[in-house]
Amino acid sequence: MTAHPTWRCWAPLAVALAVHLVMAYNAVYHHPYVGYDARQHLKNLEIYSHLKLPTSAQSREFFSPPLPYLVPALAKHFGLLATRGMRKLAQLLNLLYSVLTFVLLARLSRRRWPDDPVTMAWAFGFLGFLPVWVKSFALIRGEPLLALVTVAAAGQALLPAEDRGPTARRGLLLGIAFAAMALSRQWGLLAIAGILAALGAQMVRRRDAVRRLLAAMAISVVVLAVGAGWFYIHLRTVEGSATAFNRSGEPSFSLANQPVHFYLGLGLPELFTDPVRRSFANELLPIFYSEMWGDYECYFLVYAKDLDTGRYVPGGALERALARPESAARLDTNRFTINRYLGRAQLLALLPTAVLLLGFGLGLRRTWSWLAESRDGRPLSLEVVAVAVIVASFAGYLWFLIMYPSPGKGDTIKATYMLQTMPFLALLGAAWMRRLRLRPGRLAGWLSIALVLVYLHNAGLLFTRYTRFM
């Protein structure tokens, strides 16, 4: 990188440092009781600290795999931490997971675009200044660890395709990453399917690599089955299904399981004026977008406290309290003031969203070009793996939303559930910015300035309003 001006060499580090200073603040000060199903995840922590697996009678998050809870639970089990310390450790570990994700992201970026620190800085910026990334890593849940091990798995998947290192070792490391994904959150199984599909496509295209790739994939699947299969066997044995969930699903898959507005609703004009629950209830795109760039569910930015008890009133409890005049009168809340800022922020966020979508489109185009090439062509690329993870994850997630509808609320529509796709969207967005930079003209420069201004305006989306130490 010595050929670049000094500021370009330091740009990725500066962006990563800024991101993680914000995330460190949230990890320390965000109240551990506030978050999606927070009390259920805290129950899981407590149960795992006794070296037991939670049941459906003990926790509504009984189906969540154990890996994200393991370290803090063991710390309490061996007397190293009390209950409060265990909870705070879980949040601080999420900060470490984000740092490690950025390290792995830097390795992927350097491998794909050597000697280009600017593209790496854009990848860091697109990911680190994404509100759902910052918010999710302040909560106690499994998606932050899943995001880390998914990026690790993608890096390992590229190595057998490039014929680097012994096949058995690569297959073993890939299998370990797969097992960690499956033991972090069930969404990891979707990303695993995407990575295996990409490797399978490479195997079909590269006759000279069939044996090596098939061996690596077989080893990885065996390690996955041995390393993570026991948990899903436990769910099947105790709860009756390896895919057990805390609500009943529809008997069969049908688009009619969801109403028309679930698919076609745009949430206008509330998307840019009042993007807070119960606006556009059970509309897929506006809720997902508002969770990605704001706080539709009211667990991070939309704040409320009961003046009589001093307790926080987040999420659904806030919605119910506001529906009753006697309860609403006792609330200290920013619900009806911050919504205007959230609306403006989400309007401005259309610009970085467009860049991410253009990056995904570029990734699709390069994947199609790669698939259309003659055999024995280029090895598997980062863009192909990124597209495979994104497509498989969102396809599986859409299946889940259709099979487990919530017509009145849409409370399973959460961008956090797709957190493992965000690093790959960021890489594809950075790839599109790189492509634009290499073209003649000043469009890339003006767009960069506009994106920086958007992120400066939206900086308020990155800091929790639910603050309490320990």
Image (cartoon, rainbow, N blue to C red):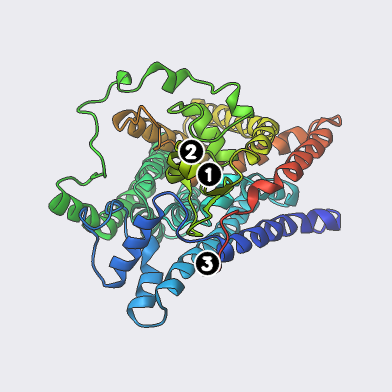
Q: Is residue 167 visible?
A: no
Quarter in which the N terminus is drawn: bottom right
Q: Could you say which disc has been placed on residue 329 in the image?
A: 1
User: On the image, numbered disc 2 is attached to which residue?
Assistant: 325
Q: Position of residue 87 (x, y in %)?
A: 44, 67
Residue 456, compared with residue 50, is above or below; it is above
Label 2 Cα crowd, 10 Å radius (few <14 / some 14-19 / many 20+):
few
Amino acid type at mark 1: Ala
Q: Could you say which disc has been placed on residue 92 in the image?
A: 3
**First of labels 3, 2 by sequence position:** 3
Inter-mark Cα distance, 1 to 3: 36 Å
Which sits in the foreground, 338 or 379? Answer: 338
Left or right, 197 with respect to 421, comes to left
Q: Position of residue 193 (x, y in %)?
A: 36, 41
Inter-mark Cα distance, 3 to 2: 38 Å
Mark 1: which secondary structure? loop
Residue 258, compared with residue 456, is above or below; it is above
Label 1 Cα crowd, 10 Å radius (few <14 / some 14-19 / many 20+):
few
Pointer 2 with pointer 1, Cβ within 8 A: yes
Mark 3: which secondary structure? helix
Residue 376, compared with residue 33, is above or below; it is above
Pointer 3 with pointer 2, Cβ within 8 A: no
Q: Is residue 268 visible?
A: yes
Left or right, 257 with respect to 84, comes to left
Amino acid type at mark 2: Pro
Amino acid type at mark 3: Leu
